[in-house]
């Protein structure tokens, strides 16, 4: 079973994502970006699903650190854009899904990056 590291400073969002994803993927989760970096190095998940706007170390900074240690794909989840903006916007090559997007859209994006 493929694994996903979920990183979001909002515990309620983290819990919801874990609940929705654990039927298909092994989930690892944390609200702390620095802890996420340690988990990513130690557990080497197949994907990092990461909030963009977090205190201390934002999602882009976390992604840059994760990418220094391998080729783990990063999918950003954000409340800063609408679902339409996430689908049509230019995010400098980054994969972005809005927090308001239907769970099916999130699952499709994950599947396109790492499979089932």
Image (tube, grey):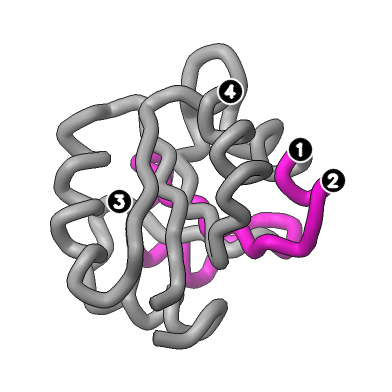
Looking at the image, the residue that sits furthest to the front is 42
Quadrant of the rendering where the C terminus is positioned: bottom left
Alpha carbon separation for disc pair 1 and 2:
5 Å
Q: Which residue is the site of mark 3?
A: 99
Q: Nearer the viewer, mark 2 or mark 3?
A: 2
Which residue is drawn at the image coordinates 32% and 75% (left, top)? Answer: 107
Q: Which residue is the site of mark 2?
A: 68
Quadrant assignment, res 15: top left
Q: Nearer the viewer, mark 4 or mark 3?
A: 4
Residues at circles 1 and 2 in contact by the CB criterion of under 8 Å: yes
Circle 3 — which element? loop
Circle 2 — which element? helix
Q: Is residue 74 magenta?
A: yes
The numbered mark at residue 34 is 4
Q: Position of residue 94 (x, y in %)?
A: 66, 59
Alpha carbon separation for disc pair 4 and 3:
22 Å
């Amino acid at each position: 079973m493929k694994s996903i590291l979920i990183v979001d400073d909002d515990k309620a969002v983290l819990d919801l994502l874990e609940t929705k994803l654990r039927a298909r993927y092994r989930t690892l989760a944390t609200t702390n970006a620095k802890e996420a970096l340690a988990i990513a190095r130690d557990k080497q998940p197949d994907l990092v699903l990461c909030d963009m706007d977090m205190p201390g170390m934002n999602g882009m900074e976390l992604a840059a650190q994760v990418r220094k240690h391998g080729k783990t794909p990063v999918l950003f989840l954000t409340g800063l854009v609408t679902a339409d903006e996430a689908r049509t916007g230019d995010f400098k090559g980054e994969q972005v899904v809005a927090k308001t997007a239907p769970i099916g859209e999130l699952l499709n994006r994950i599947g396109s990056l790492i499979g089932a």
